[in-house]
Amino acid sequence: MASLASLATLGVLASTVPAQAAPARTGAVTHTDGLKCQGRGADSDALIRYRTDIVIKAPLSTVFKLQTDVEGWPSWQAPVLSAKRLDRGPLRAGSQFRWTTPAPATPTTPETTLNITSTVRALDRNSCIRWTGPAVGEGLRIDEGVHVWKFTKVKGGVRVQTEETWTGAQVEADVPLATSMLGAGLEQWLRELKTTAEAPHHPHTHGRHKFFASRPIPDAASVQ
């Protein structure tokens, strides 16, 4: 995940950020032009997907280090309540980590905390990351989140691109709402990554706030 990741993220739920909503499932709609890391991207058949990007005025090494220091996420990402590596050493293909993020109540699911177990599937240093995994909470499950990140040097900084997909019966029951939730998490993630990486001193200095507490759940009409 953003996480799920995305997952997230992912990562991760509820805002009035406009969503890039996928259509209802009417046949095989495959997306092949998304972000990729080592030739693999997000789930090409997923109904729920969101892609966005931001330019950060900081060194590429700083941005990539923040993103791959998983256990440091709670110090600068307000929606990440906890994050723990399940292995040691630099983040790499095969690494796993477990993290938690709050999920607000929706018309069909209760307020809960999502427990996300992510597995890194691909990682190129200072270039890209791809991870996958489920997110499970009381009364809510995302069967699989696939999250891809791409980092590119540009004039004055780094362009960070991200794309995530979700699959699972619960989230697919309301694709526009789920897409809005996913988009909210990813937009927040990028904003906080930018703020932290561009800080004049040590990057892990931002206080936590209740990201979800002040943001209403969008209804389906608001994300059309």
Image (spheres, helix red, strand yellow):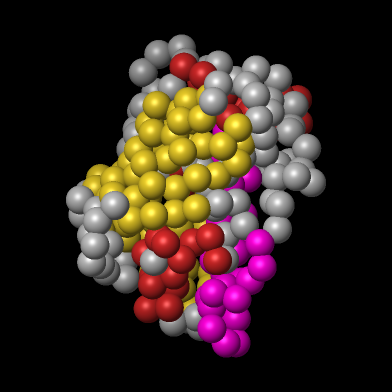
Q: Residue 20, can we see it?
A: no
Quarter in which the C terminus is drawn: top right
* Residue lying at 32% horizontally and 60% vertically, measured from the top left: 128
Residue 221 appears in which quarter of the rendering?
top right
Picture residue at 51% right of the left edge, 19% below the top: 170
Q: Position of residue 41 (x, y in %)?
A: 31, 44
Report whether 199 appears left or right of 220.
left
Is-magenta flag for residue 26?
no
Q: Nearer the viewer, residue 100 or 167?
A: 100
Depth check, front residue: 135 or 194 = 135
Q: Nearer the viewer, residue 7 or 165?
A: 7
Q: Is residue 182 magenta?
A: yes
Main secondary structure type of the part rendered in magenta: helix
Vertical position of residue 113 compared to residue 205: above or below = above
Q: Residue at x 34, y 50 (%)?
A: 97
Q: Going by the image, does 86 lie left or right of 18? A: left
Q: Residue 123: where, in percent of width, then height?
A: 25, 59
Give how far across and how far down residue 110 sits, in percent: 65, 24
Q: Nearer the viewer, residue 208 or 173?
A: 208
Residue 90, compared with residue 22, is above or below; it is below
The residue at the point 55 percent across, 66 percent down is 75
- Residue 202, picture quadrant: bottom right
In the rendered image, the residue lying farthest to the bottom is 201
Residues shaded magenta: 179-208
On the question of residue 213 being in view, the answer is yes
Name above or below for residue 82 compared with residue 132.
below
For the N terminus, which image quadrant?
top left
- In the picture, measured across the screen, residue 75 lies left or right of residue 122, that is right
Q: Quadrant of residue 134 in the image?
A: top left
Indicate the position of residue 72 as horizontal and vertical percent values. 46, 66
